[in-house]
Amino acid sequence: MPKAILLDWDDTLAHTRNSVVEAMEYILKKYNKEPWDITKVKYRDTKKSLKENFPNFFGKNAQIAYNEYLKYYMKYAYNKVSPMENANDFLKFCNQNKIDLYIISNKEKSLLLKEIEFCFPKISFKKILGNGDAPLNKPNPAPVFIALDDVAYKINKDNVWLIGDTKQDTECAYNADIQPILLGKGKFMEDGYIKNKINSSLPLLVFEGFKDIINYIQVDK
C-alpha cells in the first residue's frame, strides 16, 4: 500500500473538459481566433500548461486574454465541473486508510482550489499544487518533489503513486521514479507508448476507474 498518492485534476478527479472548452471558445471568438478544436492542434505545445500556451494562441495579447479567460471561467464555467465516477469513494478510502493525498496539476491555482472545494468539500488533501507552484510543471518531476518535500520516507515507486490520464502525468511519474498509474484508456496517448510502458522496468499500471484502484490496493494490503 502506498504512503502517498498524487493525483492530476482535470479529467482525472473531475470532469472539467467541457468547462475548459467553453471558456476557451469564448475567448478565442472574442479575439477572432480559430475554434478550439483547430487551435489546440495547430498551436498547442502539449508539454506545457494551458497558461503557458496562451502566447502561442494570442501572441502579444496573451496576458490580457488569459485574465479574461479566468474571469469568464470563474463566473460561468467552474460550477459545471463534476467529480469523476467513484472519485469521492476512492478519496474517502484513502483518507480512512491513512494514505496521504496530494493534487499536482498544471491548472491555474485559483481555479483549482475553487473546483476542489466545489467537488470534494469533505476530503482532506495534504497539499494542492497548481500552475507555477513548482519551478517547472508536469511532465517535469519538480511538482512531485515540492509536494513531498517534508516526508520522512523515500520517494520511490513503493511509497508514492501518481494517478493521471495523460502522457504528462505518466512521464512526470517516470521522471520522479515513482509508480505511474494511468486512469482510463489513455485516449490522449498512443497505444504503442502505453504498451511499451506497461512492459518497461517500472511497469505502468492501467485501471479503468477508481473502483479498480480500490480493489487493487485492498488486495495489496
Image (cartoon, helix red, strand yellow):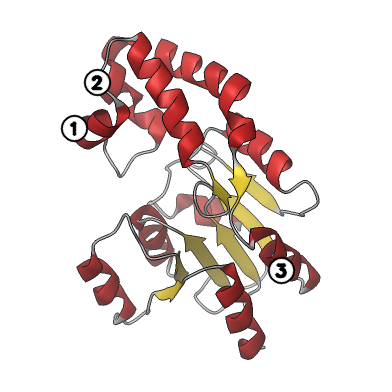
Which residue: 66% across, 85% down? 218
Q: Compare marks 1 and 3 and give the one earlier in the sequence.
A: 1
71 over 126 or under it: above or below: above
Asked if labels 1 and 2 touch by Cβ distance under 8 angstroms, the answer is yes
Residue 33: percent from left, percent from top: 26, 16
Residue 27: percent from left, percent from top: 40, 16
Q: Compare marks 3 and 2 and give the one earlier in the sequence.
A: 2
The disc label shown at residue 34, or none: 2
Horizontal side of 62 relative to 92 (left or right) equals left
In the picture, the quarter occupied by the N terminus is: bottom right
- Element at label 3: helix
Which residue: 43% across, 76% down? 205
Quadrant in the rendering for residue 75: top right
- Type of residue at label 3? Cys
Asked if labels 3 and 1 touch by Cβ distance under 8 angstroms, the answer is no
Residue that badge 3 annotates: 94
**Mark 2 packing: few (<14 Cα in 10 Å), some, or many (20+)?**
some
Instruction: Answer yes or no: is residue 1 visible.
Output: no
Residue that badge 1 annotates: 42
Distance (Cα) linking label 3 and label 2: 43 Å
Which residue: 51% across, 33% down? 19
Quadrant in the rendering for residue 65: top left
Horizontal side of 124 relative to 204 (left or right) equals right
Horizontal side of 57 relative to 168 (left or right) equals left
Quadrant in the rendering for residue 199: bottom left
- Element at label 1: helix
Residue 80: percent from left, percent from top: 60, 35
Distance (Cα) linking label 2 and label 1: 10 Å
**Mark 3 packing: few (<14 Cα in 10 Å), some, or many (20+)?**
many
- Disc 3 versus disc 2: nearer the observer: 2
- Type of residue at label 1? Lys
Which residue: 76% across, 74% down? 97
